[in-house]
Amino acid sequence: MRNIDAGSAQRHPDHLFDGIGRRFEYLRLSLTDVCNFRCTYCLPDGYKKPCNRPAELSVGEVRRVVSAFARLGLWKVRLTGGEPTLRRDFDEVARSVAEIPGIRRVAMTTNGYRLAERAQAWRNAGISAINISVDSLDPARFAEITGHDRLREILKGIDAAQKANFDSIKLNAVLMRGVNDRELEAMVDFVSSRDLSLRFIEVMRTNDNAKFFAERHVAGQSVIDRLQALGWARLPRQPGAGPAVEFGHDQAKGRIGIIAPYSKDFCATCNRLRVSSLGKLHLCLFGDAGIDLRPLLQSDDDERDLIERICKLTSTKAPAHRLHQGNSGATPHLASIGG
Ligand code: SAM
């Protein structure tokens, strides 16, 4: 094992590996589990606040947890949720993460509801990559899926993001059988003429959506087959790339990626860890309950212990999820950890 040796805690390694040699460079940090949308596959009845819900990580706690990961060589952070931009201090959090030595890229994932007015401010706060969820380009279908008739605003937001000069803009679309899977060609057309990437995401089964998943899941391979029939070709894997399989077309400006967690060897290229808005480390989106880091986020003096804890826990990461056995771990829905 290449991680820190518990007996020699004076030094810490420059890189973070698990027990089977996967290196982690990417942290997905949830800023809140609250979401204002009611996506049918995630929070169909809307967000329900649990009794006695603890406060979300403060700006100081966020800074400490990200600094510890940065010392272990993680250089990319994605701010997600829930809907991360519901946090009033979102810009401040983004700015403080972007200032942490070693962090080279701060990304965010949003449903885009504030994008049209805030894109430039987020870019100025240090966010350089943005993923926007757009499950349909048809206003009525968009409203059915998300519970919000806001497609027009979100499309304006995408224009604003393009003007704000993000290094990377990706649209996330979850394809669902009999809901929006016929829109694949329209979505492909949309990115063909724009300098944008599109990510098709397979519906993932979580604890709360088993019936929905059984009815609506579309296998990633069938999406790949359709893209290839449209002349899209697989692109070589970039070093350090995550699990998305990328496609390009010589007459298209945009690119397309497929995130297919049910495909063979999906976990082999896993390069990411997650921390929830309550400070729990999740080694896998579909793992067991998160492990609390928060007691070690209260003072800068605890950094060494925090780093040691992260190393030890990461070394125990399971080689693969258990989705194929129908086991989606302890995750009720992705808003709870940060999708
Ligand atoms: N609120 C933000 C948003 O809408 O993008 C960020 C959080 S959301 C949980 C992040 C991503 O996870 C979105 O692209 C969403 O479509 C995706 N997602 C949520 N639940 C999912 C599921 N069960 N299967 C596949 N993707 C899911």
Image: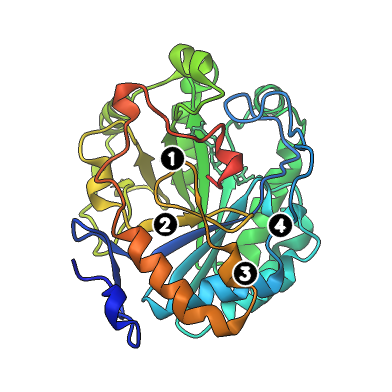
- Residue 61 drawn above or below residue 18: below
* Between discs 1 and 4, the one toward the N terminus: 4
Cα–Cα span, label 2 and label 3: 15 Å
Report the mark closest to the observer, 3 or 1: 1
Q: Earlier in the sequence, mark 4 or mark 2?
A: 4
Which circle's residue, 4 or 3, is located before the other in the chain? 4
Q: Amino acid at mark 3?
A: Val
Around disc 4, counting alpha carbons within 10 Å, would you say few (fewer than 14), some (14 to 19), or many (20 or more)?
Answer: some
The tag on residue 288 is: 1
Q: Secondary structure at mark 4?
A: loop
Question: CB under 8 Å between callouts 4 and 3?
Answer: no
Task: Tell which of 143 and 16 is nearer to you.
Answer: 16
- Amino acid type, callout 4: Glu
Q: Are marks 1 and 4 in contact (CB under 8 Å)?
A: no
10 Å crowding of disc 3: few (<14), some (14-19), many (20+): many
Residue denoted by label 3: 62
Label 2 crowd bin: few (<14), some (14–19), many (20+), radius 10 Å:
many
Which corner quadrant of the image does residue 115 belong to? bottom right
Amino acid, disc 1: Asp
The label number, if any, that marks residue 273 in the structure image:
2
**Of the image marks 1 and 2, the number of the one nearer the N terminus:** 2
Q: At 61% from the left edge and 32% from the top edge, which residue is drawn?
A: 137
The reply to whether residue 126 is visible in this rendering is no
Residue 254 location in percent, x, y?
42, 51
Q: Tag 1's secondary structure? A: loop
Q: CA gap, disc 4 to disc 2?
A: 18 Å
